[in-house]
Structures are given as structure tokens and as C-alpha cells.
Image: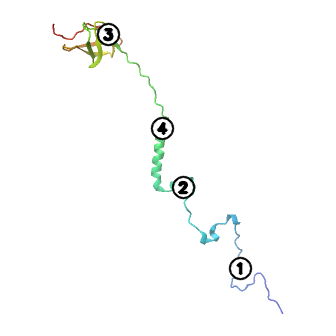
Amino acid sequence: MTEPDQSRDAPTGTGASPERRRRPRPALAPPGRRGNTLFPHQLRPPGPPTTRLGRLIAQLREPRNWIPLGLMIGLAIVAAALFLHEPQRVDPEPPILTRLSVSSSRAGTSLFVQGHYAGEIGRDPREFAVDPGHLRLRLIRRDCRARDTTVDIRAGETLSIGPLDPACPAP
């Protein structure tokens, strides 16, 4: 009996064409590098990222979050500029005051300068520091009419006035 010729190219009972039989099989990747493509029934859609950085990147990829992100970055830049800005310190020159010395013939006379109460004056002259320029003085005493006086004083000048008395009725 003769045995049938069983060569590699001979069909083995399948109806495969010679071109298909001669094509080499694709090589499989090592098991560590295989994807789930061998098992399509195990494919799952990718879930949400599990790390904070992954969640942040996922949020930044959404266009609806770009405007708030831009606003936050802009406000952070403005805040940093305000905190880092060092204002120029300008030491103002001290105002040059003038000295006004006022006395009255009676104690208990109130003195007002430019409408503000300055203090009580009496027989001894009392000195006040005032701004230079045109000053309105008003003297007031109980049971007397107020008396108004105006004075011009230049910067750095000392002026003595007195005795000044309000208009009081004669006893």
C-alpha cells in the first residue's frame, strides 16, 4: 500500500486556498504587553481617573471650564501684582505752623480759631500753634456778646495779640 503524500502544502481536509496557507501567522506580543483585544468581551469603557492629577486634566479638557479657569488665572495674576507692588513712601514735609499768643483782661474767656475751640485764655498770654494764613478769632465769655477778629499770619511768624475781650455790659 502506498501512503498518501503528506507534505506541508497539501490540504488537510480544509478547503483553504494555497495563498492562505502560505501566509505567515502574525506574531503575538508577549503576555505583559497584550491588550484586551484578544478578549473583546472584556473591553470596558475607560472610567474616571483615580488620581487628583488625572481628574484635573480631565476637567481641563472640557471647554466649559476654560472661561472660569481663565478668570481664576487672571485674578491670581492681579492679586500677585498687588501684593508684590511696593508703594513709594513719600515723607510729607511737616507743615510750617505759626505761633499765636493771645491774652484777655479776664479769666474764663473761650477762644475759637477758624470755628474750632482752641482753649481758655486769661491775663497771662497763652500760645497756640495755628496754620498760616487768614485766621478768624472769636472770643466768648459768659454774660457777654461774642467778639470776632481777623488776623493774617505768615508761615514761621509769631504774633502776640491782647488783651482781647468780648463785648460785656458795664456793671
Element type at mark 1: helix
Relative to 48, say whether 95 is above or below: above
- The numbered dot on residue 81 is 4
Measure the alpha-carbon separation of dots 4 and 1: 74 Å
Residue position marked by numbered label 2 in the rendering: 55
Q: Quadrant of residue 19?
A: bottom right
Question: Callout 2: 10 Å neighbours few (<14), some, many (20+)?
Answer: few
Q: Quadrant of residue 146?
A: top left
Question: Residue 87 versus residue 53: which sits nearer the camera?
Answer: 53
Q: Amino acid at mark 3?
A: Arg
Measure the alpha-carbon separation of dots 3 and 4: 53 Å
Question: Callout 1: 10 Å neighbours few (<14), some, many (20+)?
Answer: few
Quadrant location of the N terminus in the rendered image: bottom right
Residue position marked by numbered label 1 in the rendering: 21
Of callouts 2 and 4, the N-terminal one: 2
Q: Amino acid at mark 1?
A: Arg
Question: Callout 4: 10 Å neighbours few (<14), some, many (20+)?
Answer: few
Who's the residue at 21% across and 11% down the image?
166
Q: Position of residue 123 (x, y in %)?
A: 28, 6
Relative to 71, say whether 35 is above or below: below
Who's the residue at 46% across and 44% down the image?
74
Residue position marked by numbered label 3 in the rendering: 126
In the image: residue 54, left or right of residue 123: right
Q: Position of residue 96 (x, y in %)?
A: 37, 16
* Mark in the foreground, 1 or 2: 2
Of callouts 2 and 3, the N-terminal one: 2
Of callouts 4 and 1, the N-terminal one: 1
